[in-house]
Image (spheres, rainbow, N blue to C red):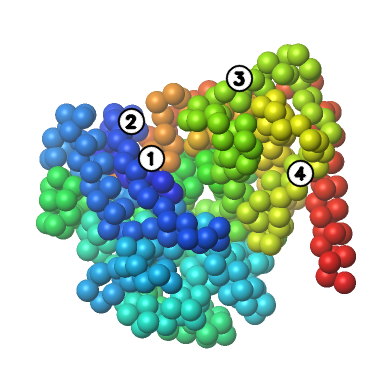
Amino acid sequence: MSRVIAVDVGTASVRAGLFAEDGALLGRCTRPISLARPSAERAEQDSEEIWRAVAEAVREVRRTTGTAAEEVRGLSFDATSCTLVLLDPHGRPVPVSESGDPRRNVIVWMDHRAIAEAERCTATGHELLRHVGGVMSPEMAVPKLMWVERHLPESWRRTARVFDLADFLTWKASGSNRRSQCTLTCKWTYLAHERQGWQRDFLEEVGLSEMIEKAALPERAAAVGEDLGPLTAEAARDLDLTTACRVGAGLIDAHAGALGLLGGIAPERPELLDRHLALIAGTSTCHMAMSPEPRHVYGVWGPYFGVVLPDLWLNEGGQPATGALLDHIIAWSAAGAALGDRAHERILARIAELRREEGEDLAPRLHVLPDFHGNRSPLADPHALGVISGLSLDHSFDALCRLYHRTALAIALGTRHIIEALNRKGYAIDTLHLAGGHTRNPLLVEFYADATGCRVTMPGKDEDPVLLGTAVAAARAAGLHPGLAEAAAAMRRQGGIREPDPARRERYDRAYRVFLAMHEQRRALDGLLAD
């Protein structure tokens, strides 16, 4: 029997899944990782702690499934996007924190310290900005490295390698310095469709001309699932696998989800993908759409070439705080702070009771703009702030439930906003493929269907599309299938469907008009302050 292992590194945990050739998930194991938040705009991690958690999870999933090390023929990784790992010439951590703590050598995706640097990138007006929605995000690699060069010159001097986290993990596993086409194209301003992928004139213009050499970046990227070689002897010992196991070029976590959800839908007719959108929804939400030709959408990242499947283009919308926003709303309230670990469950149960008692249109004068951590798509405004309209002096548990309800609706309306921007540029999205923590929140699932008017598909109870997409890359590297698209089709899993309720359409159309009006009002208020 041949098996593959997929490793997903999220913001707070590492998950390892063991898969059969047909995509069946045979077992998974999770290990926590820590996150340092020295301020609201900073987020840092420790790459050595992450690798230890990876090793523990891989060893445990093989042990609990009773799988022999020799049976594991392929391994690949996905990780949070543009989470940057800095190392010195000897592979030791280089601090990214002003504290100088060497255990903080990772700038996490959600870190917004580089807003000024991102604005400098945008001000260049360079052609490559058309592939990041017209506006450079502070979450991307170039502005973050500009910040390090400017604010931590000693760390910058010591730096000899910089990796996106998924590429760091394949390097630790295989020793290969190859980087994924997914990570470089989506987060590093590499243009995979061009003969010269790196745009050196742009790097010179923003004062980062040495980035390619400083980060030890290759001239050409490796396709997702490309065989990077076998496990090194040291990695095989750490992971308790054999050196016969092949390591596949990895990908960003949301893109792994897109591969797991969309990869096998229409291998012979890729134009059918126009109707499908993958939602990888947890702490934040990524919206992934693929097409046979490039489509430029303001405020939506991409079009990126070959970053999920060969020869297809991808557009990526995003909401930087969704699950994190619901957590924030709970923590914000004294009533929420007292709920403990089952807060979401208790709130959802009470919301169901309130809707039965008061009607489904709960708190109709309470409205939320969910941009508490900026608006990535479709406005591309990292300075955007959240808005709550319709508050009273009520600070009861029921008041919290009503605010939670309207915040969840606002999250779904934000997705509708992104869908409309995509559809104006050639997509015809009517089906959402949902993965991540939001699948466990019935209120969000309901709103995703009814507030967008789209069919929502969800994985089965024991399925995991993000791990599955990474397993597809591992299977391709191991040679278990002839190509990535063939592996995705062979390993695809079917889930359940939630159809939109047409009787609720008018209510949510009205809520959406309010949502758009609030955007205009916020813009007008900001304009008054700028006068």
Q: Which badge, 2 or 1, comes first in the chain's sequence?
A: 2
User: Residue 262 at x, y = what percent?
Assistant: 51, 40
Closer to the camera in the image, 394 or 94:
394
Which disc number belongs to residue 424? none
Q: Which badge, 4 or 3, comes first in the chain's sequence?
A: 3
Q: Residue at x 42, y 82 (%)?
A: 153
| Residue matched to label 3 | 349
Q: Amino acid at mark 1?
A: Leu
Q: Secondary structure at mark 4?
A: strand
Q: Is there CB contact under 8 Å for labels 2 and 4?
A: no
User: Residue 500 at x, y = what percent?
Assistant: 69, 25
Closer to the camera in the image, 459 or 414:
414
- The answer for how far apart the CA atoms under marks 2 and 4 are is 42 Å
Res. 454 visible in picture:
no
In the image, is 65 to the left or to the right of 96? left
Which disc number belongs to residue 467? 1
| Residue matched to label 2 | 25
Q: Is there CB contact under 8 Å for labels 2 and 1?
A: yes
Q: Secondary structure at mark 2?
A: strand
| Residue matched to label 4 | 388
User: The C terminus is located in which quarter?
Assistant: bottom right
